[in-house]
Image (tube, helix red, strand yellow):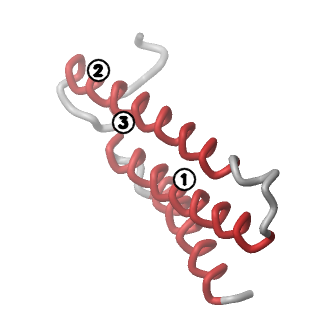
Amino acid sequence: MTPLHFSFSSAFVLGLMGLAFHRTHLLSALLCLEGMMLSLFIALALWTLQFESTSFSTAPMLLLAFSACEASTGLALLVATARTHGNDRLQNLNLLQC
């Protein structure tokens, strides 16, 4: 494994570990998701450049578009949660109480 591949895979794993173990605030969960998507985007972009194929050249842009949609939805949920509950702690959110 090259150092470049190791850095992107370790960035993804660190984002996943942060998402799994530090679930106190919704904002920290959203930041971990964005870090994971950023590492996937860069890895996919470098993969298409490495193989020089035009058929996969739109895949990084499609991933980036879905990442932007995910970020906007997450921020909308963050604002709605902060307005209704007063904070963004994930322990206060319960689907059975809605």
Q: Which image quarter holds the C terminus?
A: top left
- Amino acid type, label 1: Met
The reply to whether discs 1 and 3 touch (Cβ–Cβ < 8 Å) is: no
Neighbor class of circle 2 (other Cα within 10 Å; few <14, some 14-19, many 20+) is some
- Residue at point 80%, 70% (across, down): 51
Neighbor class of circle 3 (other Cα within 10 Å; few <14, some 14-19, many 20+) is few
Q: Which mark is in front, 1 or 2?
A: 1
> In this rendering, is residue 60 above or below 49?
above
- Amino acid type, label 2: Ala
- Amino acid type, label 3: Gln
Of 71 and 65, nearer the camera is 65
Find numbered disc 2 in the image and state the secondary structure of the residue it sits on. Answer: helix
Q: CA distance from mark 3 to mark 2?
A: 16 Å
The single residue placed furthest to the top in the displayed view is 98
Of 62 and 80, nearer the camera is 62
Is 33 displayed left or right of 52 in the figure? Answer: left
Picture coordinates of residue 86, whole percent (x, y)? 17, 26
Q: Which image quarter holds the N terminus?
A: bottom right
Task: Read off the residue under disc 3.
Answer: 91
- Residue at point 78%, 68% (across, down): 52
> In this rendering, is residue 78 above or below 46?
above
Task: Read off the residue under disc 2.
Answer: 80
Q: CA distance from mark 1 to mark 3?
A: 25 Å
Q: Which mark is in front, 3 or 2?
A: 2
Find numbered disc 3 in the image and state the secondary structure of the residue it sits on. Answer: helix
The reply to whether discs 3 and 2 touch (Cβ–Cβ < 8 Å) is: no
Of 92 and 12, nearer the camera is 12
- Residue at point 49%, 50% (across, down): 33
Q: Tell me which label, 1 or 2, sits earlier in the chain.
A: 1
Picture coordinates of residue 41, whole percent (x, y)? 58, 57
Q: Which mark is residue 37?
A: 1
